[in-house]
Amino acid sequence: MHLLRDALSEGISGFGVISSKRSKPVILCLGSADRGDDAQGACCADTLARRGIPVRIIAGKAFELLDYFKSHARVIIVDAIVSGAKAPGHLHRFDGPPADAAGFAPSCSTHGFGLGEALRLGAVLKTLPERLTIFGIESATFEWGAAPSPEVAASMEKLAQAVAEEWESA
Amino acid sequence: MSREATVSPAQGAMTIKVDCLARVEGEGALHVKVKSGKLQHVQVRIYEPPRLFEAFLRGRMAPEAVDITARICGICPIAYQMSAAHAIERAWGVTIDPRVRALRRLFYCGEWIESHALHVFCLHAPDFLGCQDVIEMAATHKPEVEMALRLKKLGNEIVRVLGGREIHPISACVGGFHKVPSNEELEPLVSELEWGLQAAEAGAKLVATFGFPEFNPDYEFVSLCHPEEYPLNEGRIVSSKGIDIDVGEFEDVFLEQHVKHSNALHSVVRERGSYQVGPVARYNLNFEKLPDTVKMLARELHAEPPLANPFKSILVRSLELMFACEEALRIIAEYAPPSEPHTEVEPKAGRGMAATEAPRGTLYHRYETDAGGRIESAKIVPPTSQNLKRIEDDLWEFLPGILHLPVDDITWRAEQAIRNYDPCISCATHYLRVYLDSE
């Protein structure tokens, strides 16, 4: 799937990263395409790519987030959210001080190091971007091989539209 | 076979359940039961669903295995690409250009640097520093964590330059690479590798100061051995207890067994039992082939073979990290692009086996192809499933000596003992939970 979806991925190349002053934010879509509502990152990436908006997919390599935090002044992240405070399908948006982001996105990574940990480590190392916006749909299921829940599926277009507007307005 | 280990009679009833063993790759659980002061059972239960790669490779064109099997693991895709490519090349009688062979070693060095830097400093070091995780460690060891992330990025960059991108690289193929780099593309790696070599040395010196529990099991170490090189892509399969075979004989000597409690197979030496693959095995069996600088540092740190303490695997990984940087520098210094990026291959009927040294240990692939080059059967034996039985045996031997400790300490040490192996449960079938029951 990634071969098709991310065939021309540029990644972060070279050691002297100079992309930090690009005017447009980097969009990072997180999660596994094969675990229920965790697929919202990959689905959002597909929709954005079709609109010609550059995206990066990060699945299972959350340490890579730190490279993007260090090298970009503006970062937009898309990931599944489980707050328990909203009904499945609710679209969350975080746009507060980057140092507060970890409280918004606590980890539920099966690898022990996910977005929450990357944000906390970035805060300790003082390498968080100047501005960080997080989008995510309140999720209900992360079963292996499962399709996204109907509630999350129904909010996918709204998620992609919100991310696109955030990127285009930057 | 039932096994028992006597523990302190004063221990009494005890129940420990830890739902999630962090800092391992994948999903599984460790169950430990103690009854009346005796260890009743130790089971590493891998409940991640079977991934069935061997089955869905059937019917695919063999060269596709290089890219398909790479998706088994996000941390060691190059290992899968290399084992698959070498096995198919053997099946089809393909000889690769020596310069391509050197590039493959460089490619592998990138993966070793990335994987070892991650495990040594971000996953394993927190155990020895009394930190819950790398985030807590970063508060007191910020330069070391920054160094680790820079080393990891160095590994990523080598993979990107050779593989087309750092995650899920796409340029390796049967016969060589789809595209090879120019000298100009490799040159920017040199100064960072020179830094990396210094950083890895400093890291090894730091790691050597950690406290290691006294624990030295009678292991059978298994690794590739090459007459002249520290093993990466080729060699005979050799063990510390007398095995010395061509890779083609792997399945005659090693047996994969189903166990009820795990979705991952357990490998054993036939009629003998568990064995260990990975850095400590490679190191013990190939120490003399390390660069002089690494051997000298190992002597300075009193870490020469024989080294059987699995807790010192973090030190061995640090030394291998140093090796990988030095080897990468050597290869780049001698590099001249091959006339063709890959040897043209002709699909045919054949049977080929190969083993290469993934960061976690020996990775075996075997493929059988029909006359059109389609895969009729495939077998993949990842390093973690080879170590799973040995991990259980380590716990059988290690736990009785610490059952007098508080429950939290036992659990901590048990998790640490598992992390000694840098297990990649993603490869073996993913997540590890620890349950310790005592009554």
Image (cartoon, rainbow, N blue to C red):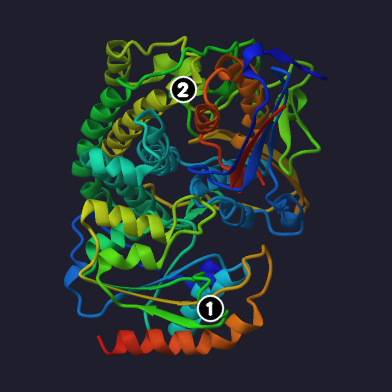
Residue at 57% of width from left, 14% of height from top?
B401
- Residue type at mark 2 is Phe
**Residue B275 x, y percent position in the rendering:** 64, 21
Residue B396 in sight: yes
- Asked whether B429 or A114 is in front, the reply is A114
For the residues marked 2 and 1, what is the alpha-carbon distance in whole angstroms? Answer: 42 Å
Please tell me whether residue B214 is drawn above or below residue B365 in the rendered image. Answer: above
Residue B93 in sight: no
**Residue A10 x, y percent position in the rendering:** 35, 67
Please tell me whether residue B125 is drawn above or below residue A86 in the rendered image. Answer: above
Asked which secondary structure carries label 2, the reply is: helix
State the residue position of label 1: A43
Residue B367 disc label? none
**Circles 2 and 1 on the same subunit:** no
Residue at 30% of width from left, 35% of height from top?
B325
Q: Residues within 10 Å of mark 2 (few under 14, many from 20)?
A: many
Residue B219 falls in image quadrant:
top right
Residue at 34% of width from left, 48% of height from top?
B158
Please tell me whether residue B57 is drawn above or below residue B86 in the rendered image. Answer: below
State the residue position of label 2: B311
Q: Check the picture and name the quadrant holding the C terminus of chain B.
A: top right
Residue B390 falls in image quadrant:
top right
- Residue type at mark 1 is Cys
Q: How many labels were placed on the picture?
A: 2
- Callout in the foreground (2, 1): 2
Please tell me whether residue B375 is drawn above or below residue B87 in the rendered image. Answer: below
- The subunit letter for the residue under badge 2 reads B
- Asked whether A4 or B84 is in front, the reply is A4
**Residue A165 x, y percent position in the rendering:** 35, 90
Q: Check the picture and name the quadrant holding the N terminus of chain B.
A: top right
- The subunit letter for the residue under badge 1 reads A
